[in-house]
Amino acid sequence: MSKPVVYLTRLIPDAGLDLLVKAGFSLRINQKARGLSAEELTQAAAGADAVISQLADPINSAVLEAWAPKCKVVATCAVGYDNIDVKAAAKLGMTVTNTPDVLTHATADLTWALLLATARRLGEGERLVRAGAWRGWEMMQLMGADVFGQSLGLIGAGRIGQAVAKRASGFEMTVRYVARSEKPEMTAIGATRVDLDTLLTTSDFVSLHTALTPDTHHLLNAKAFDKLKPGAILINTARGSVVDQVEMIAALRDGRLAAAGLDVFDGEPAIPKELMEMDNVVMLPHIGSATVRTRTRMAEIAANNVIAVLTDKPPQTPVSVG
Ligand code: DGY
């Protein structure tokens, strides 16, 4: 009998590959140094019993229909699965799994790295030093925004939002959050649940920790930017499309938004030229979960989910179809 085939849309850490090989599966891995289009994915994973995917793969209903009925499981190496049509997968009898929990702290740490880098203008400072343009200590140079004692507004208070909130206590910040329901974990650390308008009008830092859904698509639009507290800074480690990027650029230009720290972009990896030219924007290439330990654990979870489904066992972290 031939071995079940697992198609990987990008390379994953060895720990995940080893589990799949030990389980007796044959691996096919995308060899291109980039993600694939929907058409390419359709072809590349044809005939596979399982797919291990990444967060930018466009796994729409047409792709899933082409993979069915052979493909039993799509295991994404991410907590977010907005790129997968999970309803279509369910209709086709395919399981979709993700990798929650293990990336919470890496992503919360990165959020803080970005918040501090943006407030204290680290990108500008680094560019200045590397350009050999630093002439020595200057009283008026690169003055940024305070973080200690300021107010932090979190949009979304799931695992990552809560982990970000906990880290704020060391900075003695006032923490407010927007969520569908009151979170006891947030109440316990003194964070207050508010409505979006209150959060926008009172926060020195607004940080996004919500999944991308039809409800949160362009949640931060022109109207939201109009309400921001003067000097507000936006941090986005969630998904680029939660923000209307064109309106964000306008707000950064006219000062409604003082600065932005962005790990994610609408239409990434393309970055609008305007953002590239703005010194008050710190940009990272979607590396929220990129620590060796976290990415290794994500790969192991994805591999174990595939092994479970292909051996008729319940996967560890199935995505629920709402
Ligand atoms: C995810 O897993 O959804 C995150 O965006 C990774 O950084």
Image: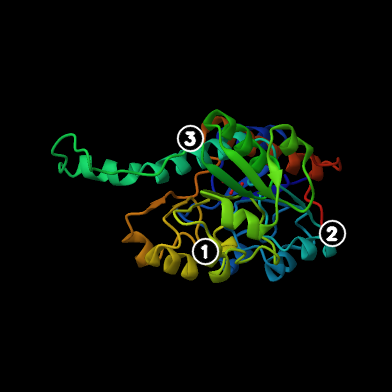
The x, y position of residue 175, in whole percent, is 62, 41
Label 2 to label 3: alpha-carbon separation: 50 Å
| Marks 1 and 2 in Cβ contact (< 8 Å) | no
Quadrant for the C terminus, please: bottom right
Question: What is the number of the mark on residue 93?
Answer: 2
Task: Quickly name the residue at label 1.
Answer: 266
The x, y position of residue 46, in whole percent, is 67, 61
302 or 237, which lies in front?
Answer: 237
Asked if 10 appears above or below 83 in the picture, the reply is above
Of labels 1 and 2, earlier in sequence is 2
Callout 1: helix, strand or loop? Answer: loop
| Marks 1 and 3 in Cβ contact (< 8 Å) | no
Q: Is residue 26 visible?
A: yes
**Type of residue at label 2?**
Gly
177 or 262, which lies in front?
Answer: 177
Task: Quickly name the residue at label 3.
Answer: 148
Quadrant for the N terminus, please: top right
Label 1 to label 3: alpha-carbon separation: 30 Å
- The label nearer to you, 1 versus 2, is 1
The x, y position of residue 229, in whole percent, is 51, 56
